[in-house]
Image (spheres, helix red, strand yellow):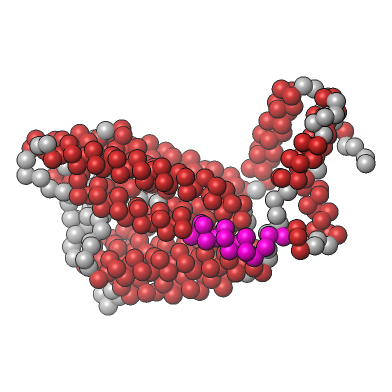
């Protein structure tokens, strides 16, 4: 076998790790230069993190909700003008992108005034229709078609924010909260479930049409383990040779005709998407549960200055803010956004595999810690 000079490494293991680290940094830098989409994604992530740091400072200085909650349009566009618990715990893209756009459409473009016949439920039904349409695009073999599906689904998510803004404008209450018991609350929940179902079904149909390749990491590990008995000088060279030749092996397989054993089976695809769906559903269910509990404990009006001060002390505590931030990253809408980005960059199968490995454990730990925190808040408030 011909050996490329870039694959030779006769140094120690520490030298090899430094080489691999430099190689990764160079590839990352080259990727950002040659693919503007990745650079834009990096800038967008930085923007979200900066806004989250500003949000942390605003939470620490927030007063009782009823004392500064105004119902005029002048404050509706301010991202941090009013910070109820639900707004704090919602996903970053929804809070910093979709909601401000929806509020702009309502307050500056006068959506309700120009279209009084369009109800919030009608908007919900329309974005439900868009969810069904997106299945066609998500299931396509063409990456361009799938990216069009991403645009359609993102417009659907925008309308999901708009129906809430229109509803609050109709009832003359701009407070960002869940209005349980209203028919629109249940309609919105049903349409959200349908939207997530359509997204997963579209991915399933795509994988059936274009089944992903099986991971070859275990093959590499097996080859490396069989060569551990050889001399240490040859070991590092052969390990680097195997790692750097993985892409070449995949390309060679794709051009020489691959047998069916190289692809993931339909059973494994169904199992992987089923596990992801369970995590997605649990994230949505527990997020609604925790938001409701925190709203009742920290956003409810208490006509006692001592208990009200205790509410603010608990709200401002770093532990409470940590719980809020964990749910901002683990909420169902954020998991959905992660999947949307994976589809956009054609990394859907890799994302699903990784989230199945770590997502469920992170979610269960967060639920356990949050329930303990809520019980502690209840016990403290009941003492006063």
Q: Is residue 194 magenta?
A: no
At 44% from the left and 67% from the top, the residue drawn is: 195
Residue 309 visible in the shown view: yes
In the displayed structure image, the side of residue 261 where residue 306 appears, left or right:
left
- Image x and y of residue 155, in percent: 45, 65
In the image, residue 60 above or below residue 216: above
In the displayed structure image, the side of residue 252 where residue 106 appears, left or right:
left
- Image x and y of residue 277, in percent: 48, 60
Where is residue 313, by image quadrant? top left
Q: Quadrant of the C terminus?
A: top left
Magenta stretch: dominant SS?
Answer: helix
- Residue at the farthest bottom position: 117
In the displayed structure image, the side of residue 247 where residue 138 appears, left or right:
left
In the displayed structure image, the side of residue 247 where residue 28 appears, left or right:
left
Where is residue 10, by image quadrant? top right
- Residue at the farthest right position: 1
Q: Nearer the viewer, residue 122 or 97?
A: 122
- Image x and y of residue 129, in percent: 44, 75
At 49% from the left and 69% from the top, the residue drawn is: 198
Q: Give the magenta range.
A: 263-277
At 78% from the left and 52% from the top, the residue drawn is: 250
At 51% from the left and 57% from the top, the residue drawn is: 276
- Image x and y of residue 312, in percent: 19, 37
Q: Is residue 267 magenta?
A: yes
């Amino acid at each position: 076998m011909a050996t490329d000079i870039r694959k030779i490494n006769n140094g120690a293991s520490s030298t090899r790790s430094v080489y691999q680290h430099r190689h990764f940094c160079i590839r990352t830098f080259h990727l950002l230069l040659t693919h503007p989409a990745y650079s834009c994604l990096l800038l967008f992530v930085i923007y979200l993190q900066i806004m989250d740091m500003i949000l942390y400072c605003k939470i620490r200085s927030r007063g009782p909700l009823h004392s500064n909650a105004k119902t005029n349009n002048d404050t509706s566009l301010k991202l941090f003008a009013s910070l109820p618990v639900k707004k704090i715990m919602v996903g970053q893209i929804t809070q910093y992108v979709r909601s401000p756009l929806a509020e702009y459409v309502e307050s500056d473009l006068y959506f309700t005034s120009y279209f009084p016949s369009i109800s919030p439920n009608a908007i919900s039904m329309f974005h439900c229709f868009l969810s069904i349409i997106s299945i066609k695009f998500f299931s396509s073999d063409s990456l361009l078609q799938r990216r069009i599906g991403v645009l359609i689904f993102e417009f659907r998510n925008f309308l999901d924010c708009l129906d809430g803004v229109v509803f609050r404008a109709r009832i003359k209450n701009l407070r960002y909260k869940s209005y349980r018991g209203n028919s629109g609350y249940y309609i919105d929940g049903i349409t959200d479930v349908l939207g997530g179902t359509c997204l997963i079904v579209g991915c399933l149909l795509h994988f059936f049409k274009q089944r992903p390749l099986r991971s070859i990491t275990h093959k590499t590990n097996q080859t490396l383990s069989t060569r551990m008995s050889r001399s240490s000088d040859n070991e590092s060279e052969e390990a680097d040779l195997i790692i750097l030749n993985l892409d070449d092996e995949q390309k060679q397989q794709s051009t020489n005709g691959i047998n069916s054993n190289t692809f993931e089976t339909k059973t494994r695809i169904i199992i992987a998407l089923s596990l992801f769906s369970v995590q997605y559903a649990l994230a949505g269910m527990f997020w609604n549960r925790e938001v409701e509990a925190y709203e009742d404990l920290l956003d409810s009006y208490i006509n006692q200055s001592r208990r009200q001060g205790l509410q603010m002390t608990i709200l401002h505590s770093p532990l409470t803010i940590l719980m809020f931030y964990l749910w901002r990253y683990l909420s169902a809408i954020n998991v959905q956004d992660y999947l949307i980005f994976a589809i956009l960059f054609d990394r859907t199968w890799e994302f699903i595999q990784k989230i199945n490995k770590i997502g469920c454990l992170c979610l269960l730990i967060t639920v356990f810690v949050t329930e303990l925190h809520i019980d502690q808040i209840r016990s403290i408030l009941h003492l006063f």
